[in-house]
């Protein structure tokens, strides 16, 4: 497999891999047709509510991760999550990327190019996962739900802007445990993040989510 390219990272750096659209102005695509919610049985609805309750119970997460693109690109790193709103993706060398969400803004730092890109947390296709309270209804439309062979798979889009992209989450079912998510952006580029030995409820230093511009020109002026 090839090393994941900076172009793929810039489009889909996993912002809870959550940001499949990290470039400013990526929201100017053509409107997508309305998408109907998947029909569910009472049992499936109960499963969905169980997943929703589980997600709301996640306040912190620390985990190694593996990130794959549909073209075979691969990257690894360490992620930290603290809800609401805070997240940090540290990619292993040679990928020169650091990604930090401080509660309002996501900062994408390319160490090699010495460039910082910013966008709002809510402008990412799965930004709802960083909310204080997560609801798998209303602002989010569940388009597919599958529960079999010990796994739960849920696909969803933003209700008002279905063209923004989709997110599919995969959980173990006994007990419910988030294992993986896949983001598909408006250009149908796909990235999958798999959690390796995740620690839910981990004690995380809040300073990991503080953003200080690390570019040499800024640090030298302090």
Image (tube, helix red, strand yellow):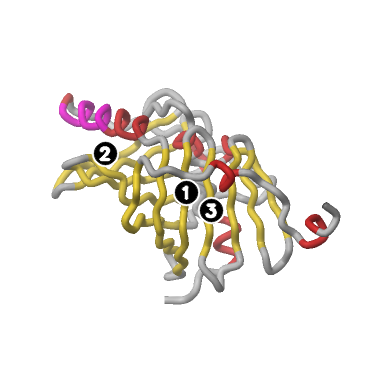
| Rendered location of residue 13, percent (x, y) | 54, 56
Quadrant of the snapshot with the N terminus: bottom left
Residue 80: give its label. Answer: 1
The residue tagged 2 is: 145
Tell which of 148 and 219 is nearer to you: 219
Residue 187: give its label. Answer: 3
Closer to the chain start, of discs 3 and 1, is 1
Quarter holding residue 153: top left
Measuring 47% from the left and 48% from the top, which residue is drawn there? 80
1 vs 2, front mark: 1
Region rendered in magenta: 43-50
| Rendered location of residue 127, percent (x, y) | 51, 38
Measuring 41% from the left and 49% from the top, which residue is drawn there? 62
3 vs 1, front mark: 1
Closer to the chain start, of discs 3 and 2, is 2
| Rendered location of residue 105, percent (x, y) | 64, 40
Identify the element where label 3 is drawn: loop
Closer to the chain start, of discs 1 and 2, is 1
Report the Cα–Cα distance between label 1 and label 2: 27 Å
């Amino acid at each position: 497999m090839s090393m994941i390219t900076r172009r793929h990272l810039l489009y889909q750096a996993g912002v809870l891999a959550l940001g499949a659209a990290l470039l400013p102005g990526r929201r100017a695509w053509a409107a997508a047709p309305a998408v109907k919610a998947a029909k569910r049985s009472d049992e499936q609805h109960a499963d969905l509510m169980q997943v929703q309750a589980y997600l709301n119970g996640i306040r912190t997460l620390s985990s190694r991760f593996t990130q794959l693109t549909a073209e075979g690109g691969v990257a690894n790193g360490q992620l930290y999550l603290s809800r609401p709103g805070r997240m940090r993706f540290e990619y292993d060398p040679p990928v020169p990327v650091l990604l930090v969400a401080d509660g309002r803004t996501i900062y994408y730092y390319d160490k090699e190019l010495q460039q910082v890109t910013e966008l709002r947390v809510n402008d990412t296709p799965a930004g709802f996962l960083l909310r204080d309270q997560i609801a798998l209804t209303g602002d989010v439309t569940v388009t597919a739900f599958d529960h079999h062979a010990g796994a739960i798979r849920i696909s969803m889009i933003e209700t008002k802007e279905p063209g923004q992209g989709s997110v599919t989450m995969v959980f173990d079912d006994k007990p419910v445990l988030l294992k993986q998510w896949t983001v598909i952006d408006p250009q149908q580029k796909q990235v999958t993040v798999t959690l390796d030995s995740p620690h839910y409820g981990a004690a995380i230093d809040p300073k990991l989510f503080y953003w200080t511009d690390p570019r040499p020109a800024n640090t030298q002026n302090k």
